Amino acid sequence: MRPILPYLLISLLATPLWAGGGLTLRVQGHRQQGTAHAGTAWANDAAILAFNPGAAPFVRKTQFITGFSLQQTNTAYLGRNLTPDQTLAETATPMYAYALLRPNPDGPLTLGLAVYSPFGGNTRWGETWQGKAVAQTFSVNSVAFQPTASLRLNSRMGVGLGIIFLPGNLQMQRALPLSSPDRSAGSLTLSGSGNGIGANIGWYYRPSHTVAFGLDIRTPINLRIKEGIATFQVPASLRFLYPQTNFQTTLHLPAQATIGATWYPQDALTLLADVSYTLWTRFDSLVVRYETQTTAIHNIKEARAWKNSLSLRIGGEYRANEDLLIRGGAFFAQSPVPDGYVSPELPDANALGVTGGGSYRLHKHIVVDASYQFAFTGSRTASLNAANFGGTYKTNTVTAGIGIAYLL
């Protein structure tokens, strides 16, 4: 029997609606979200465990932080016949939690545990829209459990390694084109959970008190689903052809490299920039293998042919007074989905976004963080050639959240 706790946590921690830039998520910390998620070279708080484990020894205090967001996404669609549709309204609540421990405040070793959502996406069109045979619902959720050890090599440089244990789940639903005497519609639902493992490797260097640099590398992860359940809703006259069965599939999640720089032009001001390159070419197909096959049930192999993608992020933080910090930022995320492979399952496009946020110290040990993000794509007219389905998509996402930090 599989452990239940990790999959219960997925439903709480990883329910994002839209990612922008494929399935890569950017909801790992409110301080970083306020600066457009630039933070690879910013030894600011315990969320650095996710952004760059090599910088963790330069976070000044043992601390525990957690937070959540409310996220709403809307995708509008205009078909080739000029018929409009849009995704159904939903609110997601992605969460995170970090513990950063300094066993010896003056020693070189830092230990930590990070819990966050690195990949995900959720699109729900409903059961009657014009593309129902291609996609009605598509959802990928994941949670990373990352124990981490970091070492300060000297007063300017650190390295770190986190091992990522990634439980996740997949759910897909689409209509079935059926020929039955009562002309009833049918549907296929695939639902399953699995695990993957990877690593998060970081390097941090601060040559002077005014500048710092960081490099973070994440290894690829294969999320293997071995005992998924395929359920067919069909008229009674066709049920013998569509029995419930198990399936197997693997989601090939990408490696990613991020370089970052932080500049401290004055004591009250911090400026940040990150560049990320994500190797999405691993996600070249979706293959589903059924345990039971009939004349009507056949294995699925659908080409994805995603491309490697780039994201650029800039942000800043200003200390207004001893208790108040203010942040802002902007980003560009390139879509990995090429023309000819744009599916309503994930109608991705190049995204732009603006962010803001702040922190307020309630007590010498307690800080409250908040952030806001608005991301949007331009209209993208594209098709899914294999299904002869296309149209124009336009997406926007609003994310706002709050968190709390306890500093020892």
Image (cartoon, rainbow, N blue to C red):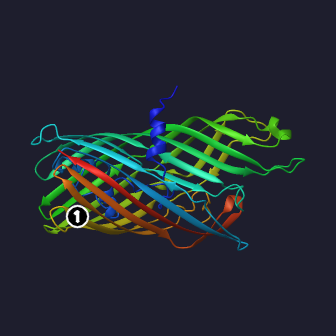
Q: Residue at (18%, 61%) from the top-left corner?
A: 323
Badge 1, how many Cα within 10 Å: few under 14, some, many 20+? some
| Quadrant including the C terminus | top left
Q: Residue furthest top?
A: 1
Task: Indicate the quadrant where residue 392 lies.
Answer: bottom right
Q: How many marks?
A: 1
Can residue 115 be seen in this snapshot?
yes
Residue type pointed to by label 1: Leu
Residue where numbered disc 1 is placed: 325
Secondary structure found at label 1: strand
Measuring 67% from the left and 39% from the top, which residue is drawn there? Answer: 230
User: Is 217 or 17 nearer to us in this picture?
Assistant: 17
What residue do we see at 11% from left, 48% from top? 154
Q: Is residue 272 left or right of residue 337?
A: left
Q: Judge whether residue 37 can be spotted in this image.
A: no
**Image position, residue 238 (x, y; %):** 83, 40
Return the x and y of residue 104 as percentages of the image width and height. 12, 38
Residue 235 on image: x %, y %: 82, 43
Please state the horizontal and vertical placement of residue 9, each as a whole percent of the image. Answer: 44, 40
As drawn, is 88 to the left or to the right of 185?
Answer: left
The extreme right residue here reads: 181
**Position above or below: 235 against 83:** above
